[in-house]
Image (cartoon, rainbow, N blue to C red):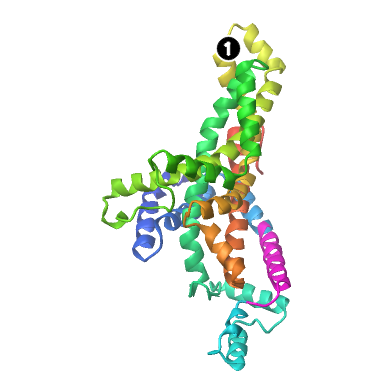
Amino acid sequence: MNPLKQFNWRLTLPLDLVLIVVLVTSGSGVFFSIFVVEAVMWMVRLLWISPSMLMYIIRRLVQAIPVLLAVLAIGFALIQLAPGDMFTQMELSDNIRPEQLERFREQFRLDQPWYMQFYQYVINAVQGEFGFSRTYRAPVFAVVSQRAANTILLSLTSLAFAWVLSIPAGVFAATNQYNVKDQFVSIFAFVGLAIPNFFLAFLLLYLVSSTGNWLPLGGMTSSGFRNMTATQQFFDIARHMIIPVVVIGTSIMATLTRVMRGEMLKIMNEQYIVTARAKGQTENKVVYMHALRNAINPMITILGFQLGNVMSGAALVEIVVAWPGLGSVLLQALLSQDLYLVVGSLIYGVGLLVIGNLLADIALALVDPRVRVG
């Protein structure tokens, strides 16, 4: 008998905590450590749980490599179209000699064609070197990782907020088709789609400021954050997240509500729904146990694309509410033509989009028994 089949993979669960503690104590962030350890450990566990799923994930990750390289190449090419480079503004200073600027450009390989810069960047990235940010005077990986954790926290919370509200709202609208309740939900969805995120953020900031500043108007933490207890720090960050989460989540919820309503209306006319009603099952059981289970599949399919869209849509909101995420970093990098910082941000965005689509496919295979991965 295959020894892999005999081994109980649940025995490896305590190892996760040990590895997370090791990474955190070595200086890695908590969220980064959890993500890396869980990703690696669950890939290993798939050897026992589902080898076919493991091969599917590996195949998808290999297919993502050309996509990532193509995006990086386009990023390198586009930033070269802008006049000047990251050292152009230094030419205005009388304390900088032209030969010094040339030496700086040679050090950052800006004197080479863009395709040579791209080739060298890929070689260095494979070795774990993602360049140095002149704007922040720090390694790109350190700058992007710190800010990306804040953006991911905001994006995932906004997604959770939108999903928790949009699914019952879509079901509510579909079960009250064409009456006042359905019209109210539809109007809310259209308004959420029509209002730009940054404009809604300004409106909420004005509303809060004109009614007594009962919520923080910007930033991620309060001034005395380091002196707070762990519980106080949690609630302090949560209060600062309310405005950006409501802004980002509203636009996502508007889209999801419309999708959920349309899928429910389509499912409610299927023959097996009519059969379930004919057997005398209650309306709630028909809606929530039969119709909702199948109507939610398209929602899971678009989840992967939403993660990338939320990351890009959160950039302007982060700037408006002064949230220390990738949005302000990317804007500053573009204004200062910090090539490596821009490319580092692109890597995070594309990587999350690929991971999001992969997780959506896995979730769809787990939820829908008609989907098989092999």
Indicate whether 161 appears above or below 134.
Answer: above
Q: Secondary structure at mark 1?
A: helix
Question: At x 59% / y 75%, what residue is drawn?
Answer: 124
Residue 213 or residue 261, whichever sits in front: 213
Q: Is 69 within the magenta?
A: yes
Q: Is residue 273 left or right of residue 144?
A: right
Q: Position of residue 64 (x, y in %)?
A: 66, 57
Q: Is residue 1 visible?
A: no
Q: Is residue 38 left or right of residue 288?
A: left
Q: Is 318 within the magenta?
A: no
Residue 319 or residue 49, whichever sits in front: 319
User: In terms of image quadrants, where is residue 185?
Assistant: top right
Q: Position of residue 259 (x, y in %)?
A: 66, 31
Q: Position of residue 58 (x, y in %)?
A: 62, 54
Indicate whether 118 appears above or below 255.
Answer: below
* Quadrant position of the C terminus in the picture: top right
Indicate whether 345 appears above or below 41.
Answer: below
Question: At x 72% / y 66%, what residue is drawn?
Answer: 74
Q: Which residue is mark 1?
A: 283
Residue 357 or residue 113, whichever sits in front: 113
- Categorize mark 1 by other alpha carbons within 10 Å: few (<14), some (14-19), many (20+): few
Q: Position of residue 114 (x, y in %)?
A: 71, 76
Q: Is residue 226 left or right of residue 255?
A: left
Image label count: 1
Question: At x 44% / y 51%, what residue is drawn?
Answer: 218
Indicate whether 336 appears above or below 304.
Answer: below
Q: Which residues are magenta?
A: 64-85
Residue kind at label 1, given as amino acid type: Glu
Q: Is residue 241 visible?
A: yes
